[in-house]
Amino acid sequence: MEYIIQTKNLSKKFGKELAVNGVDIRIAKGEIYGFLGPNGAGKSTTIRMLLGLMKPTSGKVAIFGKDLKSERINILKKVGSLVENPSYYPHLTAKENLEAIRKIVGVPKTRIDEVLKTVRLQDAANKKVKGFSLGMKQRLGIATALLNKPELLILDEPTNGLDPSGIIEIRELIKSLPEKYGMTILISSHLLSEIDQIATTVGIITKGKMIFQDSIEEMRMFARQYIKLKVSQHEHAWRTLLASGMKAELEDGHILLSDQTDQHVAEAVQLLVQQGISIYRVEEDKKSLEDIFLQMTKEELAG
Amino acid sequence: MMMRLLKVDMLKMKRKGMWFLTILGPVGVIALQMVNYGVRKEYLLQQNSDYWGYYLKNISAFTPLAIVLGIAILTSFIASIENETNAWKQLVALPISKMSVYLSKFTVLSIMFFLSSCLLMVFTLGFGLFLDFNQEIPFLEVFQYSFFPFFAALPVLALQLWVATVSKNQGISITVGVVGVIFAYSAFTLPDWMIWKWPSLMNEWDDPTINVWLGLGVGSMLYIIGMFDFKRRDVR
């Protein structure tokens, strides 16, 4: 398997605090890799190490199969990036901002109009970025990242601070890139829903540690929904359900039904009522990202 | 690559008024003498029979101040362009070496101060001729008083650029700049080893070329230290 990004035991220490702890990322060609984690989990630090902005305390980064430390410049020629809040020069126009980067990456001038068109900023090309909305600045950031026709695009929280229509627009844009240009994309977010809709592979990091890395389908297994029942005599109720062949789990005095078809829920409720068990609440319980983190970290500790 | 980076740095300085300041410096220094000689030319001519020499001394009293002040302002300007939206992270993630990024900033600043020095020489000659001293023009001294302070100020430039690029807080570089200006102002009382004294071209041996050589030597040393520190640091 050819990996575009491969890190080995990547770690970063700030003083005594271990911000990134032995992370192994593997991203194959053409993937949209969703890099998930709560704020402060080490996503940005990891991304900064991938771009050579920060030096790892230990561990290795290989991009396009080359060592980042020794071939940083050659690697970065084929990488486009947007790290956290977009960087720009407010006193310059959108075009001048792109020109300042274009001169360095050395692509023809026509690329500027192309990328402006891609992010639909052509009408604002000659306006100073100072007056741009956050969404426009974010799109300019993406345009900058696309300027050198990168083979690898690294986007750190690209939809942060955008309104819903902006998020959808950026999402569609990102989705289209691998097919159109054969790019591999690493996109980070703290929102599962965000990653869920674009990524093909997911890596989850928390407290500096990678706790999950697999395809999005595997990920969805964890994010499934439950019907949660609050009942009297939960122990008895649970056994009753199991005895009649229904899938149910007992958790913190609640019963969780994983099969959530209407018919199944109705049967379960009926069965419990017949057994004289009081039902206080029947609710849908969608696992939040936090819950999944908790679940995964628990498994991490147990296993 | 270096040429491209220089062009990019020049582009980023657009609409920032930095070129205006570059011109304002020498204009200001000569304007002070215009006032001085405009108000009391007869008195000043009585002070010393070497009219040109005395005129140059008067100018050179303000040149170091203008240079040190200019260095403080322009270095913070050039660093603030990248600091404002933390564009360092975008710039350093491009396929260029961090050292060339630093060298480009230093070069742009040097070009500006060199230009200032050229203008200072032109204005010095211009106003000197206007004053009509009727003495032979001391071209060598005019050249020395225009360019030597710049070379002697290179350590200050290297130090300020270093402080401005690595400190997240612009307050720090402004503080260092202000302290530097105060030092330059009181150059007369400073010991010879203080870099802020050097642009005044004063030293106990009365030989301004010593300040130039010291400026070039210590300037390159501080530049190299600053560049390697910039390269070593993580971009946050």
Image: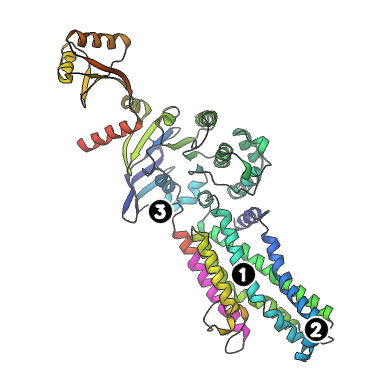
State whether residue B191 is above or below residue B182.
Answer: below
Gap in angstroms between the C-alphas marked 3 and 2:
63 Å
> Which of pointers 2 and 1 indicates the residue nearer the eye?
2
**Of residues B12 and A287, the one drawn nearer to the viewer in this rendering:** A287
Residue A213 % position (x, y): 34, 34
Q: Which residues are magenta?
A: B207-226
Q: Quadrant of residue B125?
A: bottom right
The earlier-in-sequence mark between 2 and 1 is 2
Residue at the disc numbered 1? B69
Residue at the disc numbered 3? A55
Callout 2–callout 1 Cβ contact below 8 Å:
no
Residue A126 % position (x, y): 69, 42
The residue under label 1 is which amino acid type?
Leu
Callout 3–callout 2 Cβ contact below 8 Å:
no
Side of A294 relative to B150 (left or right): left
- The chain that hosts pointer 1 is B
Residue at the disc numbered 2? B41
Q: Residue at x 14, y 17 (%)?
A: A236
The residue under label 3 is which amino acid type?
Lys
Q: Are marks 3 and 2 on the same chain?
A: no
Decide if residue A193 is in sight here. Answer: yes
**Of residues B200 and A197, the one drawn nearer to the viewer in this rendering:** B200
- The chain that hosts pointer 2 is B
- The chain that hosts pointer 3 is A
Residue B231 % position (x, y): 47, 59
> Which of pointers 3 and 1 indicates the residue nearer the eye?
1
Label 3: how many residues lie within 10 Å, few (<14), some (14-19) or many (20+)? many
- Verify whether residue A68 appears in magenta: no
Decide if residue A224 is in sight here. Answer: no
Quadrant that contains the N terminus of chain A: top left
The residue under label 2 is which amino acid type?
Lys
